[in-house]
Amino acid sequence: MGYLKNFSCICLVKLFAIYSLSCADKNTNIRKGNTNDRNNNNNINQPIATKKEEEIKNKLSNTTIKNTFDNLIKSKEINITKIDPNNSMHIEVIRLICVQKLNFSKIINEVTTKPQKTGHWIWWVYTTSKPGDSDSYKVKIDNNTLMLYLEVVPLDIFDNWKLILNTINTKFNTNKNFLPPIDHGRLPYSSKLWLNSPSAPTFLIATKRYKEVKNIFTVFQNILNKHNIK
């Protein structure tokens, strides 16, 4: 009888040990499952670049411009619905916007505080269809993409551009050398580009913005005529 009791006790101990191990395994699997669920939820919540965004980004080439584009997308400042990644001039519109985002703050500081232009940025304010020889970003815009630019450029960049243009108009009107002679050759081409009616399709936002820009460039053209810059 004593042998049977001892045998029964040993069996119960072994069964309890097996049960404990089984419960521990289950708890471990549950914890792993919860961790996996959390990881999956985190992945779901993380924004995933769309194919279109990646296509545009890959064609921007310059790392700084790519990062700026990423920031504009993440902050939802820019709407790329109307951008065709396979249209090279559409990519140029995005490039211009990114360059302006990067540089407009320091340009505003310069034109509002200094008696004349000293920096190298004329191409990003008075953009034409021909990139500047010294422009490292080689930005350009043409008559077919003016309205697209006005449609997609974020409001803060557009407002900063107008501020720069209006400030230059005020100072350039009374001081021909506010913009140095080396910049004068570009100015009539940019003015002509913006004053001619765009041939691209019009968009709701762009139509309103174009009226504002045209008014500013009308004043600018009068200043060019006054200074005999042709």
Image: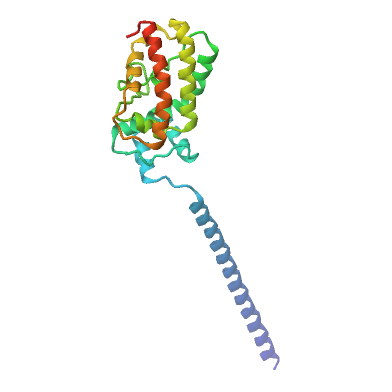
Outermost residue on the bottom side: it is: 1
Q: In terms of depth relative to the viewer, which is nearer, 182 or 151?
A: 151
Rendered view: 122 above or below 89: above
Residue at screen point 47% across, 28% down: 157
Residue 44 is situated, as x and y percent measured from the top left of the image, at: 49, 53
Residue at screen point 58% across, 63% down: 31
Residue 75 is situated, as x and y percent measured from the top left of the image, at: 50, 39
Rendered view: 127 above or below 37: above
Q: In terms of depth relative to the viewer, which is nearer, 129 or 211?
A: 211
- Quarter of the image with the C terminus in it: top left
Q: How is the image coloured?
A: rainbow
- Quarter of the image with the N terminus in it: bottom right
Residue at screen point 57% across, 70% down: 26
**Can residue 73 be seen from the camera position used here?**
yes
Residue at screen point 36% across, 33% down: 148
Dividing the picture into quadrants, the one containing residue 147 is top left
**Can residue 61 be seen from the camera position used here?**
no
Does 228 sit left or right of 160 as displayed? left
Residue 180 is situated, as x and y percent measured from the top left of the image, at: 41, 7
Rendered view: 197 above or below 2: above
Dividing the picture into quadrants, the one containing residue 186 is top left
Residue 214 is situated, as x and y percent measured from the top left of the image, at: 39, 23
Dividing the picture into quadrants, the one containing residue 176 is top left
